[in-house]
Image (tube, grey):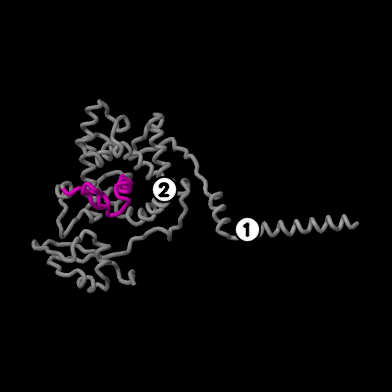
Amino acid sequence: MKIVQKALAFVGLLSLCGLFIYALQDAPTDENFETKLINDYNVYALQIPDNLEFAGEPLPLSNPDIYERMDRELLVNTYWQSNGLLMFKRAEKYFPIIEPILAKYGVPDDFKYLAVIESGLTNAVSPAGARGVWQIMKTTGRENGLEINENVDERYHLEKATEVACKYLLRSKAKLGSWTLAAAAYNAGTSGISRRLKEQQVTNYYDLLLGEETGRYMFRIVALKEILSHPAKYGFNFRSKDLYKNVPTYKVEVDTAVTDFSKFAQNFKINYKILKLHNPWLREPHLNNKSRKVYHIEIPEEGYYQ
């Protein structure tokens, strides 16, 4: 009987110890949290969709080289999660501005993803001197009617820069014959792509041997298109309220010089920083405007920055 009692007591003690250990394991300690984080995080090989295309032009995925290069860009951009989430957030803000301009010029909607890989939808500055969301060079901008100087740089004006990009792409398409080649020419130049096609005696982007940047270019565009079009499929989870939204604005016409944009901004109950956020093409804290040109300055509706 004593043996049985001792055995039962031992079993009870073991049970209490087990509950205590379980409680410790379930407690939100640093070690436990790290373990759960590791166990909950998984990396998967991705299934390449059968029918990927850009602007209605299919990728030849039966070609093993094309398949591997597409796989690389899908993997890199899917598992660069922080950057991916930022692209979703910014796309919500800027695509509604870009899309109608592409449609106006008859440029396929897929070209909005070109802007994504060019600049991450920011007013980026490249080592070569390209500027803005569409990464336009100074010469290209001026040839297409943009004002570019120390005082004003309209490469930072999203609507005007998008129009310049459309004009460039339409010319490239007319010369090269396909939207895919026109997109590649945005990176390597129309004459550069034309020369390589002739040298290598091919007619298709996917048959060209190109340098690293231009060789990855179309695959990066298509990867971003696929991921941004199917967020849940690639593990991106967010709510509508998590995305960036455009602040409503109205335009103020200015046809004279402005000596001090800080004082100018105060007239509209905002500060200079907010004025610059909505008008990044104004490069200095004043506007020379000796020619009395009419500028349209965006002013946010009252109450959004209080």
Q: Residue at x 29, y 47 (%)?
A: 118
Q: What's the residue at 77%, 58% (across, down)?
A: 13
Looking at the picture, tell me which residue is in the foreground, 97 or 22. Answer: 22
For this orientation, the residue located farthest to the top is 201
N-term mark: 2 or 1: 1
Q: Is residue 147 left or right of residue 97?
A: left
Residue 220 in the image: state x and y as whole percent: 35, 42
Q: Position of residue 265 (x, y in %)?
A: 23, 70
In the rendered image of this protein, does residue 245 appear above or below residue 168? Answer: below
77 horizontally vs 282: left or right: right
| Extent of the magenta region | 111-138
| Residue 127 magenta-highlighted | yes
Classify mark 1: helix, strand or loop. helix
- Our reading of the magenta stretch's main secondary structure is loop
Which residue sits furthest left? Answer: 291
Q: Is residue 61 left or right of residue 266?
A: right
Q: Quadrant of the C terminus?
A: bottom left
Q: CA distance from mark 2 to mark 1?
A: 30 Å
Q: Can residue 303 be found in the magenta stretch?
A: no
Name the residue type under label 1.
Asp
Name the residue beneath numbered marker 2: 80
Residue at the disc numbered 1: 26
**For residue 101, above or below residue 257:** above
| Position of residue 135 measured from the top left corner of the image (x, y, whole percent) | 25, 49
Quadrant of the frame with the N terminus: bottom right
Residue under the point 17% across and 46% down: 140
Dot 2 crowding, Cα within 10 Å, few <14, some 14–19, many 20+: few
